[in-house]
Every structure is written in C-alpha cells, then in structure tokens.
Image (spheres, rainbow, N blue to C red):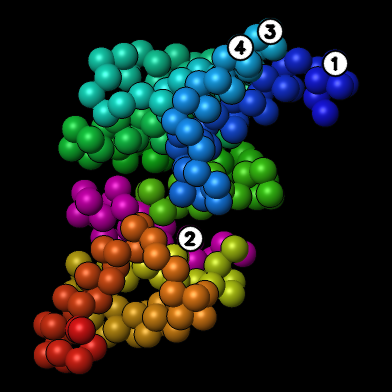
C-alpha cells in the first residue's frame, strides 16, 4: 500500500518492523520463517529508505539481529537509540532500550539493565496504548518484572507484574501475567498468595487449551516449589 502511494519511507519502516519481529519475537508469529528472511526484508527496506525515521527503524532491526557475543553490539545499539531519538520515534527507541537491557543482562550488569527498563518506561509513558503499541507495553512490563526480580528488587518486580495483569489483553486469559507475579510471590516467601494465584493461573491456562510456552515454565516450577515447601505433594506434582 505504501509503495502504491509512492511513500518509499513508509514501506521501508513497514519492512523493517517485520524484520524486527521476525528476529525479536518469532514466538508470536504463527508461521515459522526462514532465518534469512529478515535480512532479505531489511535489504528491501534499505532500498526504499531516505529519511531519518526509516533509517532508525532499520538500525533497530540490525541491533535485534545480533548474536550474544557480537563485539558490535554496543555501537549498533547506541546508534539505533540516537537515530530513533532524533527521528522522534518512541516505539523504535523503546525497542532499542530493550536491546540495551538485554546486552547488560547477559553480562549480569543489573543496575544498567534496570536503568534501561526505566528509560523504556519513560518513553512508553508518551505513547497511547493501542494496537500498534500494545506488544511493546506488554514486553516492557514483563521484562521489567524479570529484571527487577533477578536483581532482588521484589517490591518493584511485584508492581510491574501487577501492571502487566491490568492490560486489557489479559482480561479473559490472565495466566501469562499471573505467571510473572507467581515467581515474585514464591521468591518473597508469600506462599499463600502464590498458591491462590497458582489456582487462577491453572484455571486460565486450561481454559486457553493448555498452551505450551517456554516463558511460563519457570512459574510452574515456582509453584511446584511452593507446594513442596507447604508439604502438599499432590499439588506439587
């Protein structure tokens, strides 16, 4: 549609966004794509791009495609952040902040990872929650919960988990959001709260068709730990 309207930069941004999600969140895409497809889409995006917004989105897609120990990580992430900021694209800058967070997490630099979460939250405070931004809000809150939990900041982790559960997308099936709060309750020793949320988690998960999701397996182990410590072997199983 963008190309038909003669808007090459809009087409470049759209292509770059598809490349971002192919690299950044393949688990939300129903069809498995070839690993080379994101690069092919980015090559097309570059051929159409001529403004700062398109260049910023392409830069973030480049950063999302890096392997863990790539020595170019810092430079590409900071370039993407700067380009997105200059172009006035808060959603693109938000994703760049997340890449910065991941970079620090892999190196156990928790204070820097938390700061990246804080910056991302400040960016999203300027954005309306709608279909184009909802995944970013979801991803920010669950990531911030996990980062603060890893750092031992349990109160902050609980606050992020509760904000996650308030998102409209969890109204009917709250188990992915409950999964985050369960981990916090378990680590905080609030076993009664964990057990109560665990029952709601299980009911929602079964209502959703018992989907398999690697992002929720730690929560299942946390519930098993809680029931084991409470001496309930049946529920632990």
Spot occupied by residue 40 in the image (x, y as percentages of width and height): 55, 20
Of helix, strand and loop, which one carries label 3? loop
Spot occupied by residue 161 in the image (x, y as percentages of width and height): 41, 62
The earlier-in-sequence mark between 1 and 4 is: 1
Q: Which residues are magenta?
A: 145-168
- Asked if marks 4 and 3 touch (Cβ < 8 Å), the reply is no
Distance CA(mark 4)–CA(mark 3): 8 Å
Distance CA(mark 4)–CA(mark 2): 35 Å
Residue where numbered disc 2 is placed:
164
The earlier-in-sequence mark between 2 and 1 is: 1
Residue where numbered disc 4 is placed:
46
Residue where numbered disc 3 is placed:
50
- Please name whichever residue, 57 or 140, is drawn nearer the observer in this view of the structure: 57
Distance CA(mark 2)–CA(mark 1): 39 Å
Dot 4: few (<14), some (14–19), or many (≥20) neighbours within 10 Å? Answer: some
169 shown above or below 104: below
141 shown above or below 199: above
Which numbered disc covers residue 6? 1
Spot occupied by residue 110 in the image (x, y as percentages of width and height): 23, 39
Q: How many marks?
A: 4
Q: Residue at x 37, y 85 (%)?
A: 199
Left or right of 223 on screen, residue 171: right
């Amino acid at each position: 549609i963008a190309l038909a309207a003669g808007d090459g930069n809009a087409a470049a941004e759209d292509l770059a966004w598809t490349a971002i999600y192919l690299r950044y969140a393949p688990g939300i895409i129903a069809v498995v794509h070839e690993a080379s497809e994101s690069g092919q889409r980015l090559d097309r995006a570059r051929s159409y791009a001529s403004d700062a917004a398109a260049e910023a989105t392409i830069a973030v897609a480049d950063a999302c495609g890096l392997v863990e120990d790539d020595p170019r990580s810092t430079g590409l992430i900071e370039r993407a952040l700067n380009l997105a900021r200059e172009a006035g694209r808060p959603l693109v800058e938000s994703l760049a902040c997340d890449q910065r967070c991941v970079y620090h997490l892999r190196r156990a630099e928790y204070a820097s990872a938390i700061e990246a979460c804080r910056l991302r939250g400040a960016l999203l405070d300027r954005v309306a929650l709608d279909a184009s931004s909802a995944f970013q809000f979801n991803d920010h809150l669950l990531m911030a919960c996990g980062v603060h939990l890893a750092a031992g900041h349990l109160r902050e982790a609980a606050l992020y988990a509760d904000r996650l559960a308030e998102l409209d997308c969890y109204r009917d099936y709250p188990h992915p959001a409950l999964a985050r709060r369960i981990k916090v309750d378990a680590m905080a020793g609030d076993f009664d709260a964990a057990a109560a949320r665990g029952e709601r988690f299980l009911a929602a998960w079964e209502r959703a068709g018992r989907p398999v999701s690697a992002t929720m397996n730690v929560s299942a182990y946390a519930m098993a730990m809680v029931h084991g410590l409470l001496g309930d072997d049946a529920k632990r199983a």
